[in-house]
């Protein structure tokens, strides 16, 4: 199976994107960690657009009802306002929601799709604006025919707006929730001494990165000792580069325990962690 690697020369990032023919692409960070994503094809993307279309139509109807008194003043004024409203809402709907919900609209949320930067970088407002402005071209001649054909012909399943904005649409399949209490309870987490650094860690770590760390802990018993040590060493180096905790919080901690502490911070609130730790202490105390 062939694969191609791309470098983000424009932003100076050394992250590489490895594409293959199984509708996936892998983002490789400078630390050597690979995040695999499933690409969304034309069918789920069209269904998401259909949901968004009816949501937009409902919104337009509501706004027109609010502006109905203008029809009493002038029917021509009402018609002009209706056209202007539809134009503004049709463009603003995708821009506002994709920016507010980190690459998702109502339709994309329902079908678990998300717009992301094609190089694995942070999605910028300019990219969202470009891909939504070119939506008009992708819809030609009707029902997204141009965009659908472009998705079928490109390796990343991109429509013209995605190509211009350097974005892709990925699928985020629902995963079974791990038993965090069993995985993390009863262990002291030295990182929780620094609430401001915890908040910074949650802000800077993406959902994909958090999921990789979680999966590494869940599958650690399935790994051979050598690869297991190497995996957690790479993960620990990556998360240490994201947020640097004081030496007193990390000194003497093995890489696997450091990742366990990071996952504890990312997935559990301080209150939940404190209750779990207190319960573990009570269970160890003699009656």
Image (cartoon, grey):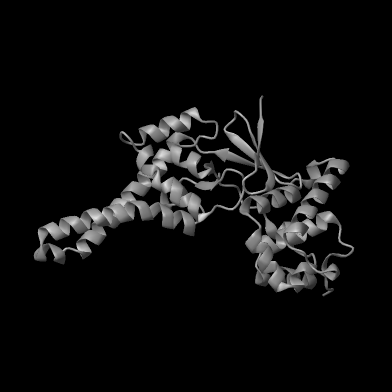
- Residue 253: image quadrant is bottom right
Residue drawn at the location 46% of the way across and 45% of the way down: 111
Residue 258 relative to residue 209: left or right: right
Q: Residue furthest right?
A: 252
Task: Please name the residue shown 84% across and 65% down the image.
Answer: 250
Position above or below: 68 against 106 = below
Q: Residue furthest bottom?
A: 287
Of residues 206 and 279, the one drawn nearer to the viewer in this rendering: 206
Q: Residue at x 15, y 66 (%)?
A: 69
Left/right placement of residue 68 relative to residue 280 reads left
**Is 90 situated above or below 45?**
below
Residue 163 position in % (x across, y down):
50, 39
Residue 276 in sight from this viewpoint: yes
Q: Is residue 21 above or below residue 9?
A: above
Pick whichever, 201 or 11, lies toward us. Answer: 11
- The picture places residue 1, in percent across and down from the top left corner, at 66, 24
Quarter of the image for residue 134 reads top left
x, y percent for residue 53: 33, 47
* Number of marks drawn: 0
Asked whether residue 189 appears in the rendered view, the answer is no
x, y percentage for residue 85? Answer: 26, 57
Quadrant where the image shows the C terminus = bottom right
């Amino acid at each position: 199976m062939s694969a191609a690697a791309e470098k983000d020369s424009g932003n100076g990032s050394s992250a590489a994107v490895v594409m293959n023919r199984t509708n996936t692409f892998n983002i490789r960070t400078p630390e050597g960690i690979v995040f695999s994503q499933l690409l969304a094809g034309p069918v789920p993307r069209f269904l998401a657009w259909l949901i968004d279309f009816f949501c937009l139509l409902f919104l337009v109807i509501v706004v027109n009802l609010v502006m109905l008194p203008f029809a009493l003043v002038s029917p021509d004024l009402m018609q002009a306002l209706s056209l202007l409203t539809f134009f503004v809402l049709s463009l603003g709907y995708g821009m506002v929601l994709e920016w507010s919900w980190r690459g998702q609209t109502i339709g994309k949320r329902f079908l678990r799709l998300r717009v992301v930067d094609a190089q694995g970088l942070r999605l910028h407002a300019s990219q969202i604006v470009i891909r939504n402005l070119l939506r008009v071209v992708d819809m030609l001649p009707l029902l997204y025919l141009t965009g659908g054909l472009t998705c079928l012909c490109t390796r990343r399943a991109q429509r013209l707006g995605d190509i211009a904005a350097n974005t892709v649409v990925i699928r985020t399949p629902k995963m079974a929730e791990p038993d965090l209490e069993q995985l993390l309870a009863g262990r002291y987490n030295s990182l929780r001494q620094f609430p401001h650094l915890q908040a910074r860690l949650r802000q800077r770590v993406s959902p994909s990165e958090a999921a990789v760390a979680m999966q590494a802990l869940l599958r650690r018993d399935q790994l051979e000792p050598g690869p297991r040590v190497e995996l957690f060493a790479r993960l620990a180096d990556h998360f240490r580069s994201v947020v640097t905790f004081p030496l007193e919080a990390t000194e003497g901690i093995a890489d696997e325990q450091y990742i366990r502490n990071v996952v504890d911070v990312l997935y559990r609130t301080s209150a939940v962690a404190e209750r779990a730790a207190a319960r573990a202490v009570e269970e160890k105390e003699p009656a």
